[in-house]
Image (cartoon, rainbow, N blue to C red):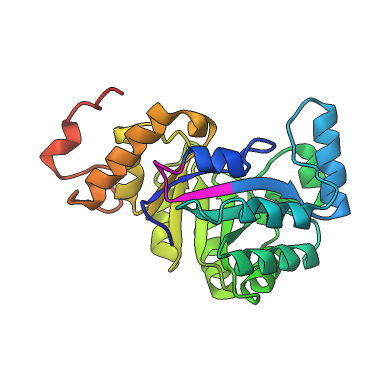
Amino acid sequence: MFGPRVAIASLSGRSDAAWAEAAADHVGAAFLGGIALDERSRRAARDLVARDREEFLPEDPLAFIDAELAALEAVPIRPAFNVRSATVEPVREAAEICAERGAVLEINAHCRQDELCAAGCGEALLADADRLCEYVAAASGTGASVSVKVRAEVDGVDLPATARRIDAAGADAIHVDAMDSEPMIGDVADAADLFVIANNEVRDRASVREYLNYGADAVSVGRPSDDPRVLRRVRRAVDEWFEGGERDHGSGTTTTESASTPEPQS
C-alpha cells in the first residue's frame, strides 16, 4: 500500500497538507484529517471546537479534501484522508475525490468523543459492523483504496471478526490503535487479508519491532508526527526490520540478536 512502511496518523485540526509535506522525508504515507463530512458530524465537530478541541471545519469539506490532496501532488508520499460521517453518501463522494487523486480514503471508526459517537460516527460506527461495511463497500466501489481506522478495547467489539467483515466488503487496510492490547495486532493480521497499520505509542525501535513482529505491515506515528527526531528513529527501525529482521509471528519478540541493541539516540 505504501513504502517506506511508516505513516503519520491523522490528528484533528492539525493534519493538513503542510503537515504531511514536512514529514515526507521520513514516511511513506500521511493520513490527513479527520474531517467531518455531513451535517450531523459537522455539528458534533462544532461542539468539540466549543470545548477547545481543534477541528477542520471548512465551509465545503469535499472541496477542502480535493485542495489538500492537490497540494500534495508533487510530494513523494501516499496521501490518505480520514473522514467522519453519520451518513454514507458523503463518504462515497469523498472516496471519488481520493480515487481521482490516487489517495486512500480512510473511514473513521475510531474517535471516542461523546459528541461524535452520539452523531453516529467514530466508535459508534465500529460498534455497528453492518453500517461500517456499507461505508466500506460504497467507498471501495469508487475505485479508491480504502482503510478503516479502528481502536482496540471497545466493549462488545470483536476486532478480528470486524476485520474479516470489512475485508469482505472491499477494504484494503485496517489502521489499528492498539491501546494497551498490542497482541491484538497479531489477531487482526491473522483474521483477514488486509494491510495492517499499527498505531499507538510508536516512538522508537522497540515499539516498531513489537508491532511488526505481531504481524503489522506498517506502523503509524500519532502525536509526535511533527517531531523529526521521532520520525527518524521510527523510519530507521522500520527499514532495518524489512531489510533483514526475523519475526517470530505472534510473540511480540524478535529472534535476531540485534533485537537487544540499544535504541540509537537522535
* Quarter of the figure with the C terminus: top left
* Quarter of the figure with the N terminus: bottom left
Query: Which residue range is magenta in the image?
Result: 24-31
In this image, 157 relative to 196: left or right? right
Residue at position x 61%, y 69% in the image: 99
Q: Is residue 34 above or below residue 107?
A: above
Is 121 inside the magenta-drawn segment? no
Q: Position of residue 15 (x, y in %)?
A: 62, 40
Residue 127 in sight? no
In this image, 81 relative to 258: left or right? right
Is 27 inside the magenta-drawn segment? yes
In this image, 28 relative to 92: left or right? left
Q: Position of residue 100 (x, y in %)?
A: 62, 69
Residue at position x 56%, y 49% in the image: 31
Q: Is residue 56 above or below residue 91?
A: above
Q: Position of residue 249 (x, y in %)?
A: 27, 54
Q: Quadrant of residue 165?
A: bottom right
Q: Nearer the viewer, residue 146 or 69?
A: 69
Q: Position of residue 104 (x, y in %)?
A: 57, 61
Q: Nearer the viewer, residue 200 or 183?
A: 200
Q: Residue furthest top?
A: 265
Q: Is residue 67 above or below residue 203?
A: below
Q: Residue furthest front?
A: 74
Q: Nearer the viewer, residue 60 or 222?
A: 60
